[in-house]
Amino acid sequence: MDISFHGAAGEVTGSCLLVTVGGKQLLLDCGLIQGSAAEEARNRRAFPFNPQAIDAVVLSHAHLDHSGRLPLLVKGGFRGPIYTHRATRDLSRIMLLDAAALAERDAVIETRKRQRQARTAVEPLYTRAEAEAAVRQFRALDYDSEQDILPGVRLRLRDAGHILGSAIVELWLTEGTTTRKLVFSGDLGHRGAPILRNPATVREADLVILESTYGDRNHRSWNATWQELGEVFRAATQHAGNILIPAFAIGRTQELLYVFKQHWREWGLDRWTVFLDSPMAIAATEVYAHHANLFNDKDKDRRRRDGDLFALPNLHFSRTSSQSMAINRIQSGAVIIAGSGMCNGGRIRHHLKHNVWREQCHVVFTGFQARGTLGRQLVDGAPRVRLWGESIRVAAQLHTIGGLSAHADQEGLLAWYRGFGQPLPPVALVHGEPIAIDGLAARLKTLRAPVIVPTPSERLDLTDLPR
């Protein structure tokens, strides 16, 4: 009975954990590696395990760094069920098909370049047909219900409060006369966030696998965050430019639309035209509305009273490429929400090319920017960036709204972990950059918690856990 860490060990992306019990193999997440071109090239490597030998997958949530290699797993011969929350099933279909469409497009473009140089063609990472094949293996579950998914494996999903359908995974593993309870946090949400409920408290575990994205820092308060975002709009109004907001299609986009509606007049949003320039984000917003039963109680009441939580009188959906290109003719007065959230793909790169060199432009970062991404370069103060081979001066005013994170901060992670009570169970830290993991580990050790910092591919015997 053991667990191996095949992704998100010492880094934020590529979540992938392999649990072995009683001769069965269970995968927790199968995420895409995101970042620089060199890092993303790792997605094409063979899995460090045999996909055909995997009996089942449990998916914590729909974000690609947790779900994005599932089509590759199926392509490699995995034929078992993929257990996840039903909202995650709906969102994952959108995410995986979009990722496949982008991969197909990029392969076509790269192949044309190579043909002109008499070089071999490039195959997409996976196709839309392969993404659809993965989605067909999804098995939808609800929160809080226990289910036997393999001999010796019992599963329960709890609300993680990160995005719609995100789950804390509870696993009871039995081999012979030995039972161990494994709790995987997935990505834990930021308490008090709009729309979603707070992460569920779990009371018992023999081992906790804990994310640590913001393990070394705390977010600003929600009130301070809303004030900071409002100040950006007030400042931008004076500069007669556009506001670009790179945003994750799932979670962050819906939060932004919600907050814009709540502060529409206060922030002067009635003076702007708001564009949601992302077919994937538009589809995800429709899924959010369909699963409104998962909203927190306050926003369920607000929805009954005010109707659609994401509707604005000056909101325009941009679905087609031609609609997106038309936005770039607007010199001022546009708020443009587009993906990808880390600027490493998607339509936001076109908007940056047309705006980031303009001093009157404002770029608002509302989420984590991983190492190697264009977003990280901008946040770190790069004077110039490259887009489609062109070096472009960065003159726009850049804003990082750190409090608008969908991840728990250090205090939030500690508070959730303390919910297990005394004696605190062993905790393995994943899904964080080394500085974040080190910061969280130091705080956990002050609680006398048994802390494990796994290295890539490290195997941990679950029958011999530290106490």
Image (cartoon, grey):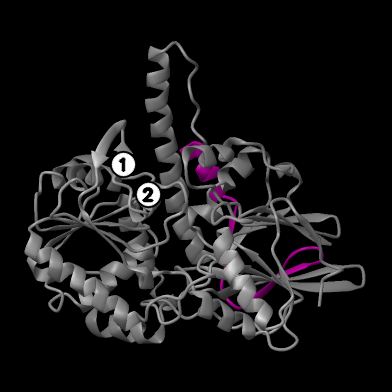
Residue 219 image-quadrant placement: bottom left
According to the picture, the residue beneath numbered tag 2 turns out to be 377
The kind of residue tagged 1 is: Val
Q: Residues within 10 Å of mark 1 (few under 14, many from 20)?
A: some
Residue 116 image-quadrant placement: top left
Residue 349 image-quadrant placement: top left
- Circle 1 SS class: strand
- The x and y percentages for residue 370 are 46, 54
Number of numbered callouts drawn: 2
Q: Which residues are magenta?
A: 126-154
- The x and y percentages for residue 188 are 53, 72
| Depicted 36 relative to depicted 213: above or below | above
Please give the name of the residue rendered at 14% of the width and 67% of the height, measured from the top-left corner.
235
Q: Residues within 10 Å of mark 2 (few under 14, many from 20)?
A: some
Please give the name of the residue rendered at 29% of the width and 51% of the height, measured from the top-left corner.
278
Mark 1 and mark 2: span between their CA atoms?
8 Å
- The x and y percentages for residue 373 are 42, 47
According to the picture, the residue beneath numbered tag 1 turns out to be 385
Quadrant holding the N terminus: bottom right
Q: Are marks 1 and 2 in contact (CB under 8 Å)?
A: yes
Find residue 365 and name its label: none
Q: Is residue 164 left or right of residue 205?
A: left
Q: Is residue 54 left or right of residue 286?
A: right
Q: Is residue 311 left or right of residue 407?
A: left
Q: Is residue 347 visible?
A: no
| Depicted 273 relative to depicted 218: above or below | above
| Depicted 330 relative to depicted 183: above or below | above
The answer to which of 19 and 449 lies nearer the viewer is 449
- The x and y percentages for residue 33 are 54, 47
Question: Is 136 contained in the magenta span?
Answer: yes
